[in-house]
Image (cartoon, grey):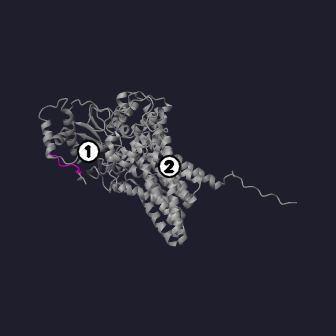
Amino acid sequence: MPPPAPRRPSLFRPPDLRSLLLFAAVTALLTLFWWLAVSASRAKSQTSDELPHIAAGYAYDRFGDFRLQPENGNLPQRLYGLPGLAADARFPRDPENWSVARYWHLAWDYFYALDNPTDRIVQQARSLNALLGAALGLLIFWLAHRHFGPAGGLLALAFYVFAPNFLTHSALATSDVCAAFFLTLAPWLFWRHLARRDFASGILAALASGLTLVAKFNGLLIVPLYALLGVADVWLRADPAFRVRGRRFVANFALGLLQAVAAAIVIWAFYNFRFSARGPDLPALDASDWMLDHILPAAGATRTVIETALSRQLLPEAWLYGLTNVLAGASARPSFLAGEHSDHGWWQFFPTLFFTKTPLAMLGACLLALVAGLLAWRRAETSTRRAWLIAGCPLFLTALLVWFTALRSNLNIGDRHILAVYPPLFIALGILATRRTFAVAALALLIGQAVASFSIRPHYQAYFNPIAGGPAQAYRLVADSSLDWGQDLPTLRVWLESHRRPSEKFYLGYFGSAWPPHYGVRPDAFLPAANYIVRPPHVPYELEPGLYCLSATILNEVYSVYRGPWTPQMEAAWQRSRVAPPTAATFPQFDYLRLARLCKFLQLREPDAHAGYSILIYRLTATDLAAALTGPITGAHRVRPQP
């Protein structure tokens, strides 16, 4: 009797109990992350950049018009446009704003002037972005699991789930988490393709490369990154013989070119395979402050490349316009750090944010992981060390290149621009699960991370560790999207309902693009601010005793023409403006000068309260106002000399 035929291995073998438990744990952690992020965002007003992101995405999806907000990533904005499509929202079509691509005004009308379900649209867009945050968590788990096993993957994911900066930006309809996801995924897939050199891995890498380039323009970091990976592949994987390495280097260059061609096809697909940014049956672009002729000179060394791509229509017009806009905007931008103003930033800006906005438990875990890695390196054989270098190469080079770019950047406004350095760190924490001693310490640190995260909830954006003095002192260190992105109007409304006295005057200096009355915040007067899209009328008003609520960015005068020390020239202009009662024509300058004096006075004073840490609240008496408006000005931030 012949022996029984061997059983074929099943493609769908039932998972064992350990696999089921691992799947359940990962699913639970990702669900928890999504819920923590989305539920906290419900307590927040629409942030500054969400306004154009969501509205532009709607214009892309509904009209096929790509002139609005092209500098912040077509892919995430298309995602954020979907809730408006589902709600059949109305969109302003007035030729005046369309013809100049005045997207801030169009977006403001879309949110607040057409009776659209704004809050629902914003919350659904945020929920969709939180799915990208969960996807990044899954990627972190998967890569850590590959290197350090199931326990390492779970540990890396758990630290990510309680990271305040990712809980912040995953639940905002902005492109930063999407960019961090693809800047983690694409280099790893390209590195994998350089090892396998087959069609399937090449297609996956090319798709990820293209998506990286439509997620956000910092995705262009994959160009030098892929070059570095190509060289590293030759050094780490090829035979030492010169000819062998030479042939592999040429082959890697060819593979890189194929990636570029395929990525360009992905870019064209996101712009409907159309060169023109203008959608069908929409007004032409007549003029704009951001016309290419105006911003190309600021594009620097890349100007010739962009002009060639435009003239030969190598890439969509809107993508090239967005790239030029980013390069021009990044050449100089007002910023603030620890009592100093600058238009060109500081190399210390992003390291300062990293060490103050990362929980101490996470910093401690990173230090412990470094110790664990060095100990393991000492014990490892040469072949094992080489295998580790190969495995970690794309993650290490990604973090290194993001840091290199950040340290040289003039755009110093928020830690969101270095989110891509964190995934390699979370993944590296997985090594702590490989030894019992380190695992016990890592669990204690993880509890510390969770405690820090819950202690600041729902104000994740305002998280600062004790190195910075905690969130209450953060306004003295930074402003703008590092702390203050216009998110705390609901918190301010709740505070006013509980603490505002009957008939007490209330003045608001707000940094953001949201409309405060939409969130129930109705001041007696709006203090002047350069960021108002629909400007309140310059009706003369007096400053009277009462509540003065100022966003941290307004208090620190980040975008004020009167920032810095109060000079004799400013004092002379102030005294001239007070000679006669201001008229409708002279009141705007008087109002800005008055606010500058008030801010410089308040910069030396502790606030009486705060709303979400980003809006500082002062209760001023008649004596306080007299000192601010007529007394000597002794306090003001410094202005860094231009390079």
Amino acid on which disc 1 is placed:
Glu
Q: Is residue 610 magenta?
A: no
Residue 296, image x, y percentages? 33, 44
Q: Which residue is mark 1?
A: 557
Would you say 307 lies left or right of 623 here?
right
Amino acid on which disc 2 is placed:
Val
Q: Nearer the viewer, residue 264 or 328?
A: 264
Classed neighbour count for the residue bearing mark 1: other residues with Cα under 10 Å, few (<14), some (14–19), many (≥20): many
Residue 66, image x, y percentages? 43, 37
Mark 1: secondary structure: loop
Q: Nearer the viewer, residue 372 or 108?
A: 108
Label count reads: 2
| Magenta span: chief secondary structure | loop
Q: Which residue is mark 2?
A: 261
Mark 2: secondary structure: helix
Q: For the magenta stretch, what is the residue range?
A: 632-638
Please indicate, yes or no, whether residue 268 appears anywhere in the rendered image: yes
Classed neighbour count for the residue bearing mark 2: other residues with Cα under 10 Å, few (<14), some (14–19), many (≥20): few
Extreme residue in the right direction: 1
Residue 544, image x, y percentages? 21, 34
User: In the figure, 569 relative to 518: above or below?
Assistant: below
Residue 85, image x, y percentages? 49, 32
